[in-house]
Image (spheres, rainbow, N blue to C red):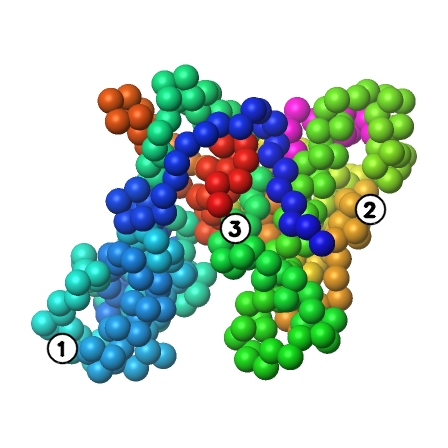
């Protein structure tokens, strides 16, 4: 079992240093909705350094006598970064925070809202990244690559953080599903099985990129033969060859409205329209995280997806965007320091490190 990662731009690798620390990596959460300024929940915008979200919550809970279960948050943020996010707590605790003073946590602003913030209540995140030891030649290359990513988007791989310090959490997840693991802690089991679901998704996405590259490389009968070598046979390849986007859509793909919305299946009748809507960023294809109640692809798309399906009965499955579109991209090269700085926005669930690896054309772990 090997975790795969295909780079769709296929350029020669670029060397740079990326250090995940509070000076060179900043994450700012973008909330899902505007807070009303009224209600029974106090909403705090907090900045933390060198702490996980859970570590921050535990500090606030213990130091200020607040039940940790009453503290709401939208997403977990990196420890090795400076991160800005929103948390909520019942208004009755407001007085407890009157003399708030923590070395690595700062309250930037506060307001009120009628509801508790819950997991997933964010649109996405804004990132600032500083790459070091970038030569002028590589800086020019990075600028060119960023332009391509801005135009085409990026594959939405799970980042290396998903797979643990040694990168092998998915192997433990597989052992759990096969009944070979003796781990009893439910949260740990869920973590490992999630890693295995992510492994299947990443390998499926790598295969789709490879197949898309084959479609761009061959025509007509040569394409049919090349696809057969990959173990795939399609009655209709004309619609595949017409697509200009580097990631090809297939009949039977489960599409998601972008950047959020309901799922539906592309079909013979809708594929031409769906191709155009994908190019317009109105919809995006999705990959499977196997599990209970997960929607499955059909027709041509199912021929590829079927090789990456596992019977995961212990957890719910879902669909995940296979392709996302970075926004608000800004770059700056500081030649005197050999620093290359990027600002960009990604929708929730997407990893900044995935985009950096696409730029590097190799792993940056």
> Callout 1: few (<14), some (14-19), or many (20+) C-alpha neighbours within 10 Å?
few
What mark, if any, has residue 160 been given in the picture?
3
Q: Which residues are magenta?
A: 237-247
What mark, if any, has residue 303 been given in the picture?
2
Mark 1, secondary structure of its residue: helix
Quadrant housing residue 15: top left
Q: How many discs appear?
A: 3
Q: Nearer the viewer, mark 3 or mark 2?
A: 3
Mark 3, secondary structure of its residue: helix
Whether residue 218 is visible, yes or no, is yes
Left or right of 217: which side holds 68? Answer: left
Mark 2, secondary structure of its residue: helix
Q: Nearer the viewer, mark 1 or mark 3?
A: 3
> Callout 3: few (<14), some (14-19), or many (20+) C-alpha neighbours within 10 Å?
some
Residue 341, given in percent of the width and then of the height, sits at: 32, 32
What mark, if any, has residue 95 been given in the picture?
1
Looking at the image, tell me whether mark 1 or mark 2 is earlier in sequence order. 1
- Residue 103, placed above or below residue 132: below
Give the overall secondary structure of the magenta segment.
loop
Of 179 and 82, which appears nearest the observer? 179
Residue 293, given in percent of the width and then of the height, sits at: 69, 66
């Amino acid at each position: 079992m090997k975790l795969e990662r295909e780079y769709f731009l296929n350029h020669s690798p670029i060397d740079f240093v990326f250090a995940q620390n509070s000076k060179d990596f900043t994450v700012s959460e973008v909330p899902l909705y505007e807070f009303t300024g009224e209600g029974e929940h106090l909403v705090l915008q907090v900045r933390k350094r060198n702490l996980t979200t859970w570590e921050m919550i535990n500090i606030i809970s213990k130091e200020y006598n607040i039940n940790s279960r009453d503290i709401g948050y939208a997403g977990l943020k990196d420890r090795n970064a400076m991160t800005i996010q929103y948390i909520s707590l019942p208004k009755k605790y407001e007085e407890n925070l009157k003399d708030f003073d923590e070395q690595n946590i700062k309250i930037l602003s506060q307001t009120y809202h009628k509801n508790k913030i819950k997991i997933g209540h964010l649109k996405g995140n804004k990132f600032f990244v500083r790459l070091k030891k970038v030569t002028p030649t590589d800086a020019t290359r990075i600028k060119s690559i960023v332009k391509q990513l801005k135009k085409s988007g990026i594959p939405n791989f799970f980042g290396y953080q998903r797979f643990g310090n040694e990168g092998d959490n998915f192997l433990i997840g597989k052992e759990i599903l096969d009944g070979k693991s003796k781990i009893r802690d439910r949260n740990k089991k869920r973590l490992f099985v999630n890693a295995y679901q992510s492994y299947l998704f990443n390998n499926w996405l790598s295969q789709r990129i490879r197949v898309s590259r084959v479609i761009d490389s061959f025509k007509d009968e040569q394409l049919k033969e090349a696809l057969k070598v990959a173990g795939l046979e399609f009655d209709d390849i004309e619609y595949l060859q017409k697509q200009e986007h580097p990631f090809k859509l297939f009949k039977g793909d489960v599409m998601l409205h972008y950047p959020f919305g309901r799922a539906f299946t592309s079909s013979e009748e809708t594929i031409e329209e769906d191709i155009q809507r994908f190019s317009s960023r109105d919809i995006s294809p999705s990959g499977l995280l196997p599990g209970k109640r997960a929607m499955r692809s059909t027709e041509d798309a199912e021929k590829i997806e079927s090789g990456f399906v596992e019977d995961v009965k212990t957890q719910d499955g879902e669909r995940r965007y296979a392709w996302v579109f970075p926004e608000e991209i800004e770059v700056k090269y500081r030649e005197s320091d050999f620093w290359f700085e990027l600002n960009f926005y990604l929708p929730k669930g997407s990893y900044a490190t995935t985009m950096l690896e696409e730029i590097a054309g190799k792993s940056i772990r």
